[in-house]
Image (spheres, helix red, strand yellow):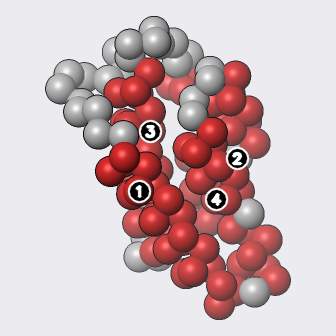
Amino acid sequence: MVIIHTLTMTAKEQPVIERALVIHILGVISALEHRSITIEEAETLWFCREVTTLLQRKAIRHEIVHILQLGRELRQIEKLIPHAVPKSLHDMRTLATNWLISNDTKIVATVWQ
């Protein structure tokens, strides 16, 4: 979270940074789907209030913040209806993938500087 805490960007850089964020979020979703990380680990990486609040303050697109907010609900879903977790992950993956397809700014240089 230290890296994202110091996130600064210009309007020109924002689309590239948003694309990188979504790619990273997709990696976490994939790891959850393959059970190589836990929901608790995903919460420490992306799916927590601090990250969503910070990204909202940085004016990251609502669709991206919405995916993170869905991730924040995973622990409750796991407790209440564990069999619904795969569908929730699938829905998150679909939203993230569709966002990438519709926002096709290419990453051509290092994003995290």
The residue tagged with tag 3: helix, strand or loop? helix
Q: How many numbered discs sit on the rendered protein? A: 4
Amino acid under disc 1: Asn
Q: Quadrant of the C terminus?
A: top left
Query: Which residue position is annotated with label 3?
Result: 21
Q: Residues within 10 Å of mark 1 (few under 14, many from 20)?
A: few
Query: Which residue position is annotated with label 4?
Result: 71
Q: Residues within 10 Å of mark 3 (few under 14, many from 20)?
A: some
Q: 82 or 70, which lies in front?
A: 70
From the viewer's perspective, is residue 1 above or below residue 101?
A: above
Query: Which residue position is annotated with label 2?
Result: 48
The residue tagged with tag 1: helix, strand or loop? helix
Tell me residue 47's x, y (percent). 64, 51
Amino acid under disc 2: Cys
Tell me residue 40's x, y (percent). 65, 61
The residue tagged with tag 2: helix, strand or loop? loop
The residue sitting at 39% across, 57% down in the picture is 97
The residue sitting at 65% across, 49% down in the picture is 66
Between marks 2 and 1 in the image, the one whose residue lies nearer the viewer? 1
**On the image, which quarter does residue 53 sit in?**
top right
Residue closest to the far front: 102
Between marks 3 and 1 in the image, the one whose residue lies nearer the viewer? 1
Amino acid under disc 4: Gly
Q: Are marks 3 and 4 in contact (CB under 8 Å)?
A: no
The residue tagged with tag 4: helix, strand or loop? helix
From the viewer's perspective, is residue 39 above or below residue 7?
A: below
Residue closest to the far left: 108
The residue sitting at 38% across, 13% down in the picture is 12
Query: Which residue position is annotated with label 1?
Result: 98
Amino acid under disc 3: Leu
